[in-house]
């Protein structure tokens, strides 16, 4: 007999440097909760794992800035976010923390496995060092100008304006974020994971996945085309999991490497808590387990490439069966961001609106294949028109009819199962959507069943039959009450709190609360019903208007208001410039005559350009998208009068123009034969 399939479902570990917002809910937490609830209704063996990611530069920096310990920072956000998840109905089997002892031990054991196999490679690298602070500066301790888009507040790991991944040495005019000190470049020794060595193995594994989302495959393919490169697994930082080998004092394991191991350590912790300490191996080392990572698209590379490669290197562990990553949820046209403190905090929204209304609204706009948009008006419409008008209406009219016409009891029935069979058949379509991670479609089909139930009530007209054909009327109401129970099962993954309320209204329990009982007779005739209640009170305009006008978060009030204005008014804002300002920018056509990669840089190309009768050199972060030989002869547009700068010690005299879409950067090229040096206007 074949062993039953196990499901190990993970939700991305939220970084404990701020409060989670509804963008996180849409991307990585509500989808797996919906999926896991469905699996448990099916009777599947499922474990749902997550926890706080509590190491890294952002936490260490926050502690320095606030003059508190890192422990105070992570405690603040871990417990607050944990409560917010509970309030919205995210039901983890365990929500752990990477600061726990068991995680440190597990991460160090994993690290030592690779170190003892001589997989990790020691390298000397150039790194920014603050003479004032007497330490090497990790990526987020550095800020400067982005070499791709010119943003003057880019971080040492990423530019939030253009989305480019960066290294501190690639920033123009870098400085310490803590003291403002201008750092120097020094040699530092670190251990690296040879990711490139696993490119062929990872490629074969990835492209064997025929059921993965296309957005995930496309994203991964971009990285594979550029070629996987070695990644440092140690860094100079005080806060984190200490490197467990000699001659590495003052170093911790890089958070990108140790954080995903938190899924393993959390699984261990869960089974220890239920007195089965060795059972975790069945889920991480058993062939019958399906490991499913729910994440946002900014985590695709770690869960689809880097962590699987580390698991391959270690040996003995299963690889992900699927990584159903979601795109971003926006509000008022802006991407939500924890670091920018821009977003509707989960802890706040659950205090103002019923959790199931929030769950339903987010579930109906899940960014499964492209970015989606949240609006307060949409939340109001979803509640008033769909939840109250369709779902709440059916439950209420059925129960009220039974109360008033059948003495608050479930009337008798014979064998009128046509409508129940219809619901049973429709459930198969819903199951297929769940199995393919099409949760929005699963919700749509679920609500279609409720719509069909309302139609059945209308078409059978029990209010007409109750006088002369009360027995037939009773059968119809019995069917409707049976449907109410089935609906309670159907909506449970999306609306768990409402599902519980319906059971109480029906005066029933969870004896038959299983997926295969949908469309069956689950309520006994003659049983008295419970107390009725309005499931979805109307949300008034004034409440929504208040939310639209109020601050979403105190530190981002002005930013949010500007976004609302920008998207709702046709005004001449201060971001508009005059013709005289535009004339200050000298845009010229340039021809690429030489191009080469900058040594020890992942992003930079050095271009020699012909601009009219002169030549100039520009260094630009485009090597992920263009090979040096592809650039020769291209006619591009540059800012010709930009103040000269240095990138990795190389002079750069200008900036080229480019645009970014779906993670792909494309140069602004000149159409037709135009002489280099021609003015662009």
Image (tube, grey):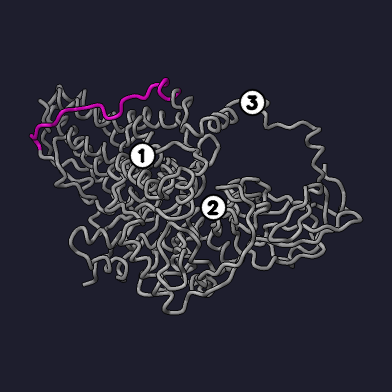
Q: Is residue 433 left or right of residue 297?
A: left
Q: Earlier in the sequence, mark 3 or mark 2?
A: 2
Q: Which residue is mark 3?
A: 570
Q: Please determine whether, in this image, residue 536 is positioned above or below residue 617.
A: above
Main secondary structure type of the part rendered in magenta:
loop
Q: Nearer the viewer, mark 3 or mark 2?
A: 2
Which secondary structure, mark 3?
A: loop
What element does badge 2 sit on? helix
Circle number at residue 359: 1
Q: Is residue 675 left or right of residue 297?
A: right
Give the residue displayed 73% in from the left and 56% down from the top. 646
Asked whether, in this view, residue 271 is left or right of residue 368, the answer is: left
Quadrant assignment for the C terminus: top right
Q: Which residue is mark 2?
A: 140
Work out whether residue 98 or residue 138 is closer to the camera in this orientation and state it.
138
Q: Mark 1: which secondary structure?
A: helix
Q: Identify the residue at image location x=22%, y=38%.
A: 500
Residue 267 in sight: yes
Q: Which residues are magenta?
A: 525-545
> Reading the chain from its start, which is encountered first: label 1 or label 3?
1
């Amino acid at each position: 007999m074949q062993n039953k399939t196990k499901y190990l479902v993970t939700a991305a570990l939220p970084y404990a440097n701020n409060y989670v917002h509804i963008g996180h809910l849409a991307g990585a937490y509500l989808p797996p909760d919906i999926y896991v609830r469905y699996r448990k209704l099916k009777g599947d063996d499922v474990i749902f794992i997550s926890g706080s990611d509590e190491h890294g530069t952002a936490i260490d920096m926050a502690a320095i800035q606030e003059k508190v310990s890192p422990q105070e920072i992570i405690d603040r956000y871990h417990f607050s976010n944990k409560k917010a998840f509970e309030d919205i109905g995210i039901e983890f089997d365990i929500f752990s923390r990477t600061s726990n002892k068991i995680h440190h031990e597990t991460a160090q054991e994993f690290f030592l496995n690779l170190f003892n196999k001589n997989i990790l490679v020691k390298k000397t690298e150039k790194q920014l060092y603050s003479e004032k602070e007497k330490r090497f500066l990790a990526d987020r301790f550095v800020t400067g100008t982005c070499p791709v888009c010119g943003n003057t507040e880019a971080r040492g790991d990423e530019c939030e304006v253009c989305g480019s991944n960066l290294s501190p040495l690639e920033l123009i005019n870098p400085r310490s974020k803590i003291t403002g000190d201008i750092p120097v470049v020094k040699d530092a020794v670190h251990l690296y994971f040879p990711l490139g060595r696993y490119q062929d193995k990872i490629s074969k594994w990835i492209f064997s996945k025929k059921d993965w989302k296309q957005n995930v495959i496309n994203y991964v393919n971009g990285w594979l085309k550029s070629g996987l490169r070695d990644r440092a697994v140690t860094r100079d930082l005080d806060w984190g999991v200490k490197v467990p080998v000699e001659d590495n004092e003052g170093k911790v394991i890089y958070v990108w490497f140790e954080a995903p191991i938190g899924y393993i350590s959390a699984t261990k912790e869960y089974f220890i808590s239920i007195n089965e300490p060795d059972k975790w191996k069945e889920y991480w080392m058993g062939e019958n387990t399906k490991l499913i990572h729910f994440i946002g698209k900014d985590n695709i590379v770690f869960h689809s490439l880097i962590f699987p490669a580390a698991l391959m290197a270690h040996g003995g562990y299963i690889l992900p069966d699927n990584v159903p990553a979601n795109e971003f949820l926006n509000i008022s046209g802006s991407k939500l961001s924890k670091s920018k403190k821009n977003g509707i905090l989960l802890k706040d929204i659950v205090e103002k609106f019923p959790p199931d209304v929030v769950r339903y609204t987010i579930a109906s706009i899940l960014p499964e294949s492209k970015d989606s948009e949240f609006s307060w008006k949409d939340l109001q419409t979803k509640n008033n028109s769909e939840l109250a008008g369709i779902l709440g209406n059916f439950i209420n009219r059925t129960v009220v009819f039974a109360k008033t016409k059948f003495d608050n009891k479930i009337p008798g029935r014979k064998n009128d199962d046509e409508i129940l069979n219809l619901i049973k058949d429709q459930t198969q379509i819903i199951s297929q959507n769940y199995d393919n991670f099409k949760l929005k479609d699963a919700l749509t089909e679920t609500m279609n069943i409720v719509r069909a139930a309302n139609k059945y009530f209308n078409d059978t007209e029990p209010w007409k039959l109750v006088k002369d054909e009360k027995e037939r009327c009773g059968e119809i109401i019995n069917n409707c009450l049976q449907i109410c129970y089935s609906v309670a099962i159907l909506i449970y993954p999306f609306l768990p709190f409402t599902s519980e309320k319906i059971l109480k209204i029906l005066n029933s329990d969870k004896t038959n609360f299983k997926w295969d009982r949908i469309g069956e007779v689950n309520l006994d005739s003659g049983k008295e019903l419970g107390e009725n209640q309005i499931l979805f009170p109307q949300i008034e305009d004034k409440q929504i208007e208040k939310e639209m006008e109020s601050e979403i978060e105190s530190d981002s009030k002005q930013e949010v208001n500007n976004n609302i204005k920008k998207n709702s008014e046709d005004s001449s804002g201060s971001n508009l410039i005059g013709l005289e300002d535009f004339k200050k920018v000298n845009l010229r056509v340039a021809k690429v005559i030489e191009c080469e990669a900058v040594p020890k840089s992942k992003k930079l190309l050095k271009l020699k350009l012909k601009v009219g009768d002169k030549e100039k050199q520009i260094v630009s972060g485009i090597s992920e998208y263009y090979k040096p030989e592809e650039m020769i002869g291209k006619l591009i547009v540059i800012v010709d009068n930009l103040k000269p700068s240095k990138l990795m010690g190389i002079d750069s005299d200008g900036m080229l123009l480019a645009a970014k879409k779906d993670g792909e950067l494309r140069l602004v090229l000149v159409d037709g034969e135009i002489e280099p040096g021609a003015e662009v206007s």
